[in-house]
Every structure is written in C-alpha cells, then in structure tokens.
Image (cartoon, rainbow, N blue to C red):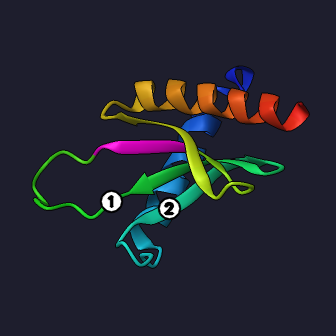
C-alpha cells in the first residue's frame, strides 16, 4: 500500500481489513483488529473498539504495532476514507523504515 499503489487497490485493501475487523472475534477487551501490512516485527493494523453508541459515526482507528514489545508505537483516528488511506500509507512507511534499521 505504497503511495504509488494508491487507488482502487489501496481502497480495496482497507475495505477488506475493515470487513475482517468487523467480523473478527473480539479480544479480551472487546477490540477487533485486522492487519493492513507487516514488516518484520512491525505491523499496521486497523482497530475497531467496542462502540458505546451504535448510531455514532464509525472512526477508522489505525495503529503501528511492535510485536517485539507487544505494544502500539503510534496510532491515529480518522473518519474520512481519504484521510485514513493517507494515514495508513504514512504508518506503513514508518513500519517499513523501522524494519530496515
């Protein structure tokens, strides 16, 4: 999902992750996740939290996760698909860079 791949493929990848997260089993906190990309120990995930009000707009929450430390390194929340794609590309770039170090 590099910038040069932006377009229908990137939208499809994010859409698939969103659908997967919606139907994935929840973890012990009620959170659902789906991977967008992984580079070594670094993974960019789409995260869905338990919503308290189902009629609220659904945010797209992304996180850069380290499997080495088992914690999020960075995260962001977006409501717009274009902004979410831009944020995903940025986090993927960071994950790729961290893996190369």
Residue situated in front as seen by the camera: 25 or 69: 69
Q: Would you place residue 12 above or below residue 68 in this image?
A: above
Q: Is residue 23 magenta?
A: no
Measure how far apart labels 2 and 1 are at the Cα level. Answer: 9 Å
* Image position of 88 with respect to 42: above or below: above
The residue singled out by tag 2 in the image is 33
Residue 52 image position (x, y, % from top left):
14, 62
Judged left or right of residue 79, residue 5 is right
Question: Which residue is at 21% across, 60% downward?
Answer: 51
Q: Pick whichever of labels 2 and 1 is earlier in the sequence.
A: 2
Residue at the (84%, 49%) spot, across then down: 40
Quadrant of the rendered image containing residue 34 = bottom right
**Mark 1 packing: few (<14 Cα in 10 Å), some, or many (20+)?**
some
Query: Is residue 41 left or right of 59 when viewed as pictured?
Result: right
In which quadrant is the C terminus drawn?
top right
Label annotation for residue 49: 1
Q: Is residue 61 magenta?
A: yes
Mark 2 near mark 1, Cβ–Cβ under 8 Å?
no
Label 2: state its secondary structure: strand
Badge 2: few (under 14), some or many (20 or more) residues near its Cα, within 10 Å? Answer: many
Magenta region: 59-63
In which quadrant of the rendered view does residue 77 lie? top left
């Amino acid at each position: 999902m590099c910038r040069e791949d932006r377009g229908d493929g990137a939208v499809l990848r994010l859409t698939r992750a969103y659908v997967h997260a919606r139907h994935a089993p929840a973890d012990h906190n009620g959170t659902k996740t789906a991977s967008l990309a992984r580079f070594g120990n670094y993974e960019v995930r789409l995260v869905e939290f338990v919503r308290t009000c189902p009629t609220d707009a659904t945010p797209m929450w992304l996180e850069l996760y380290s499997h080495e430390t088992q914690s999020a390194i960075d995260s962001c929340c977006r409501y717009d698909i274009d902004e979410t794609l831009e944020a995903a590309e940025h986090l993927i770039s960071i994950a790729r860079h961290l893996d190369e170090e």
